[in-house]
Amino acid sequence: MPLYSEVINDEKILQILQGKYQTVLLIGCGACMNESLAYKYALPITINSTSVPFATVNELIRLADLLNKNGYYAKIKFYNNLNGFFCMENISIDNYPVGNLDSFDIILILSCSAGYMALCDKFPYKKIVKITKPLGSIF
């Protein structure tokens, strides 16, 4: 059962980073978060059966653009149902070409709470902040 979440507003995201962090990795999940964003903005979940989580990628690009325009260095990475979701135990973020995680001051994650907790468990040494708020379940 997917969890419906919304992204916190841009001002709050900029406040999280202000004066503390310069390099940002934005990570988005292709499961609950993708469904939530697709529903909210009437976007497709995937395009042309590529399994790319379109709604999540669209939001990651928007957020990276916002951060880059405000003087931060931001990169994005997303996960889809072919690679597994954050909350699945078999996912290995180390298999994805995001560069050295140590090169980022902070990771901002677009996911439900289960995905956030799973990523924190995998990288306890990294500053990870969930920039979404749960609102309910999608049936």
Image (spheres, rainbow, N blue to C red):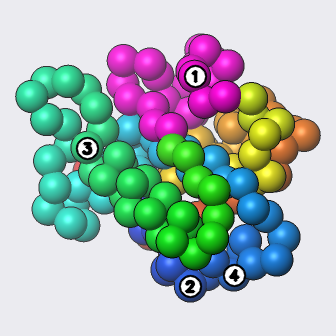
Mark closer to the chain start, 3 or 4: 4
Residue at the spot of label 4: 15
Q: CA distance from mark 3 to mark 1?
A: 19 Å
What amino acid does circle 2 point to? Glu
Q: CA distance from mark 2 to mark 1?
A: 29 Å
Q: Are marks 2 and 4 in contact (CB under 8 Å)?
A: yes
Counting from the top left corner in percent of width and height, residue 29 is at: 46, 41
Crowdedness near tag 2: few (<14), some (14–19) or many (≥20) residues, C-alpha within 10 Å: few
Residue at the spot of label 1: 97
* Residue located at (30% from left, 38% from top): 53
Residue 36 is covered by the magenta coloring: no
* Residue located at (83% from left, 44% from top): 126
Main secondary structure of the magenta stretch: loop
Q: Which mark is residue 11?
A: 2
Mark closer to the chain start, 2 or 1: 2
What amino acid does circle 3 point to? Phe
Q: Which residues are magenta?
A: 77-99
Counting from the top left corner in percent of width and height, residue 85 is at: 49, 30
What amino acid does circle 1 point to? Pro
Residue 81 is covered by the magenta coloring: yes
Vertical comparison of 92 with 134: above or below = above
